[in-house]
Amino acid sequence: MATINFLVRSKGALSQIYVRIRDGRKTDIKIPTDLLIDSKYWSSKKGEVRQTAEFTEKLNLTKRLGDLRALLSDNIQSTKLQGKELTHEWLKNMIDLFHNRVKGKSNEFIYLMELKKKSLQERINKPSPLTLKCYDTTIQRLKKYETYKNKPLHIHDIDLTFHSDYTRYANIELGLSINSIGKDLRQIKTVCFDAKDKGIQINEQAISKRFESISEKSDFVTLTKNELEVIKQFTGPDYLVNAKDWLIIGCWTGCRIGDLTSLDSHKILKDPKGKDFIRYTQNKTNKTVDIPLHPDVIEILGRLNGFPRKISDVNFNKYIKEVCKLIGLTNEVFGSKIDKETKRKKVGTFPKWELIRSHTCRRSFATNHYSDLSNKVIMAVTGHSTEKQFLEYIGEQENAHLNVFTDVWEKEPETIQLKKEA
């Protein structure tokens, strides 16, 4: 005969109450009930709520547990009469039925990811539009994965086998880069953590270190200060000059393309000394950034009496390639670009102008200032949270300190003479 017991596994003000069902030697299943209690009001010995006056919700919670027990008892009997087994999935469906949740939805992964996105939107500190867009992108890819597998994806399906299978699918079938797949896996893992916090049973592999967000080093090119001088002198069709001006501004402000083309005169302020500077909030991180006006930026703003005409991301990427080609950036350099036919990243050696894109602005800003300014100062503009992130971003290693020590020591007079032992 099946037995039903309730238990609390942790100590705290919001402890999850679990239900355990045992039936013979084969059946022993246990999951959260999604009912919470302060552990000091729970009797571990009796497996029930303590009837203490201090706990005002004792009667209500006791009744809820009684109702759940009755529901389970009735369904255990009917399930066994039908010749079906009492499984973990069956018990999870019973808990969903008890809480009046939509059947089949509560453990569907895409549904949980949509709930996570919704909870982010409802926070006081709103996430950036880019964060929400990333959730939408991952959700759409997972829907394609479900179609490919011809079955819905459930929270308990997220394990190391899924990690390998989705990585292969996204790379081969969708043609995604390793870094794009890594972003998906990072969000998937976040949703699993969130589900566990809510008492939803997950596969522990999903939150293990082995369920990693894979990545690969990005190949990128930058524009040197000398190249920017040549670009600055470019003359030609109006639409290319407009793109050229945005390119110059981008390389001296370090803005991402979405932030760059949203700059306007309202974002120019004066510091205590009366000098102009740009203040804007990064779309991706919601960080406020202040950046002084570079002389080349001042020249453009003065010539145009403001910022250049607005331009779409697509046209910006297209036109700055044309500009760089026309000024002679035809030298072969190593990098990567998207193959127009296969729609996948292609790594190799190409004429430099072919590798110029909107993110070149931000990379160029960081690398051109790396030797002249402290990392901390540059990071105040790029918005990187740690020096490790910044160094990875510009392709540097964390061993720059070696040269600093060497330079200092070589300048010191030799003060110690080693004597040979007699």
Image (tube, rainbow, N blue to C red):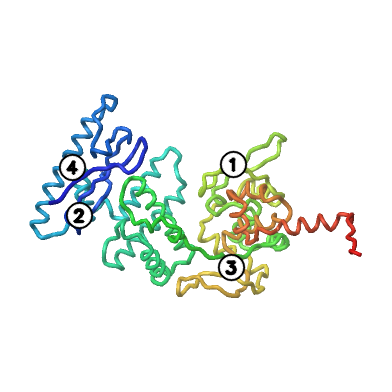
Residue 257, image x and y in percent? 55, 54
Q: Earlier in the sequence, mark 2 or mark 1?
A: 2
Residue drawn at (66%, 62%) of the image: 223
Mark 2 or mark 1, which is nearer to you?
2
Which residue, given by chain and number where applicable, does mark 1 sit on? 267
* Residue hosting label 3: 355
Amino acid type at circle 1 is: Lys
Residue 27 marker: none
Pointer 4 residue: 68
- Mark 1, Cα crowd under 10 Å, few <14 / some 14-19 / many 20+, is some
Q: CA distance from mark 1 to mark 4?
A: 59 Å
Q: Residue at x 68, y 36 (%)?
A: 271
Q: Is residue 121 above or below residue 107?
A: above
Q: Mark 3 or mark 1, which is nearer to you? A: 3
Residue furthest left in the image: 81
Q: Residue furthest right?
A: 422
Q: Is residue 414 left or right of residue 225?
A: right
